[in-house]
Amino acid sequence: MDVDTRLLRSFATVAEEGNLTRAAERLFISQPALTKQIKQLEQTLGARLFERSKSGMALTGPGAALARTAADVLGAWDRAEQAVRAAESAASKVLRIGFLASAANEKTQEILAAFRERRPDWRVELRQASWGDPAGALASGEVEAAFMRLPFPDQDRYGLTVLLTEPRCVAMAVGHRLAARDSLRFEDLLDEPFVAAPNATGAFRDHWIEADARGDRPVRVGAVTEHPDDWLSAIANGDGIALAPLSASRYYARPDVVYREVAGVGPSTVALAWPKAPPSDGTLADFIRAAMEAADPV
């Protein structure tokens, strides 16, 4: 019997969460699509895997039996996929590295140069991720490591080394009523509409709308964007304001967008992330060492 690993991964996520809504958010799919996948797996196996109720999804006997072995199956498949990717990269001598927005700022080129000194016959291919699925390529094995802004979905699944921390500022249209002020407090922004990442990104989105500092004041979302160009256009068009790393004022300067200091928000942290337990030797290990050497002192 052949089973699509996608269905097995969906089952494992529902089993872990005990809730379809939370599982669908983790998987970045709709709840009806997830329900359809579970039914398809049940039909394939010829067994009912969950008892559905208003309180959630409880494993049946067959479901519990599958849950005990699913992690091993998925882990073996992930390791096999990573081995194939590594072999493919070794054959072509290309290391694929993901990144968000400005990657590791000015450290990016420093890290790439240090890696080339170690591996002069290798090339680094940078692949930009969307804010709608910041760790997607890392999770699927499409990239071997990624420059990430913390926090991001399923962060605990990865090894991390912090590269830099920088203040956050607020970006707004040049004609915004608050743009004439050199500095602001976060309390000044609570009633403003925000340009936000998709809701399914969880802690990543919450960090960039500063959910923890809002108390009982819910965020007003003026626009949802997944890419820097769309984000900048939404801000310039007056759809909302946005928190941004201070480096955005250098990397994303536009005449119709201004960046202002804002007090009352924590900094932004950039880290290199990779699958846990990377090899102690090899190309990826050399890239990680280059990144660690470039990191700011703790």
Image (cartoon, rainbow, N blue to C red):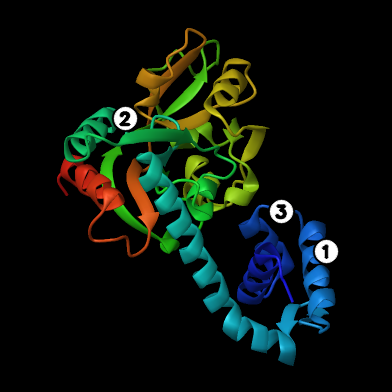
Q: Percent from the top left, x then y, of residue 61?
A: 72, 92
Q: Which residue occupies the foreground of this view, 140 or 205?
A: 140
Q: Percent from the top left, x then y, of residue 139?
A: 51, 54
Q: Amino acid at mark 1?
A: Lys
Q: Residue at x 71, y 70 (%)?
A: 3
Q: Earlier in the sequence, mark 1 or mark 3?
A: 3
Instruction: From the image, tell me which residue sits under label 2.
Output: 105
Image position of 3 with respect to 174: above or below:
below
Marks 3 and 2 sit apart, C-alpha to C-alpha, by 31 Å
Q: Which residue occupies the foreground of this view, 207 or 104?
A: 104
Element on which disc 2 rests: loop
Q: Amino acid at mark 3?
A: Ile
Residue 190 showing in the rendered view: yes
Position of 209 with respect to 277 (left or right) is right
Q: Amino acid at mark 2?
A: Asn
| Mark 2 burial class by Cα count in 10 Å: few <14, some 14-19, many 20+ | some
Element on which disc 1 rests: helix
Q: Residue at x 52, y 10 (%)?
A: 256
Q: Which residue occupies the foreground of this view, 11 or 252?
A: 11
Q: Percent from the top left, x then y, of residue 114?
A: 19, 36
Q: Residue at x 65, y 76 (%)?
A: 15
Q: Earlier in the sequence, mark 2 or mark 1?
A: 1
Q: Which mark is residue 29?
A: 3
Q: Percent from the top left, x then y, of residue 293?
A: 16, 44
Q: Residue furthest front?
A: 91
| Mark 1 burial class by Cα count in 10 Å: few <14, some 14-19, many 20+ | few
Image position of 247 with respect to 96: above or below:
above
Residue 167 showing in the rendered view: no
Q: Kindly check if marks 3 and 2 are in contact, taking CB atoms under 8 A apart as contact.
A: no
Q: Kindly check if marks 2 and 1 are in contact, taking CB atoms under 8 A apart as contact.
A: no
Instruction: From the image, tell me which residue sits under label 1.
Output: 36
